[in-house]
Image: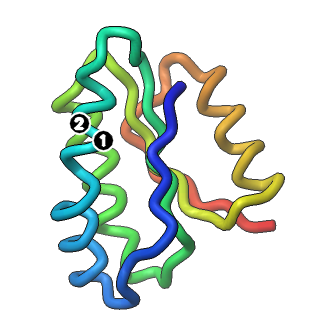
Amino acid sequence: MRRHEVSRLPLGALDAANAFMAFHLDAARATLARPDTTALAIILPPAPHDHRDWRLALARDLAREMAPKRVNVVAGLPGEACEASLRFLSDAHGLTGQYLVCHE
């Protein structure tokens, strides 16, 4: 499973969604277009609850667009909780289009 890590996004939900679409979506699509990529985890920094809708839409819509390749979005700081979620996703070959929030 490949990873696309985003370390910073704006605080506001609309601004963060816009920044991801402008600066990261094409790179995620390019990674998924590679023949050797079967799954992608997009790792985003933690955010308030009002970011949930755009992040879930990103996971679902990109997973539908790139099927049968798997796409999931994980939110959390680097650490064991995030790594445990990524290990789970790596082994869950039928799981796609999900948004997971990790806490230490």
Name the residue: 79% across, 58% down. Answer: 79
Instruction: Give the x, y percent position of residue 99.
Output: 46, 52
Residue where numbered disc 1 is placed: 28
Callout 2 touching callout 1 (CB < 8 Å): yes
Q: Label 2 is placed on what type of residue?
A: Arg
Q: Is residue 3 shown left or right of residue 71?
A: right
Query: For this view, does 75 lie left or right of residue 52?
Result: right
Picture quarter with the C terminus: bottom right
In depth, the one of 2 and 84 nearer the eye is 2
Colouring scheme, one of rainbow, by chain, secondary structure, one colour: rainbow
Q: Is residue 68 above or below residue 27?
A: above
Q: Quadrant of residue 78?
A: bottom right
Residue nearest the observer in this picture, 79 or 81:
79
Q: Name the secondary structure under disc 1.
A: helix
Displayed quadrant of residue 87:
top right
The picture places residue 27, in percent across and down from the top left corner, at: 27, 43
Identify the residue shown where x is 29% and y is 34%: 63
Give above or below for 60 relative to 77: above
The residues tagged by marks 2 and 1 sit, at their Cα atoms, a distance apart of 4 Å
What residue sits 45% from the left and 60% below the top? Answer: 6
When the figure is inspected, residue 24 is found, relative to residue 53, above or below; the finding is above
Total residue callouts: 2
Name the quadrant of the N terminus: top right
Identify the residue shown where x is 32% and y is 89%: 12
Residue type at mark 1 is Ala
Q: What residue does disc 2 label?
A: 29
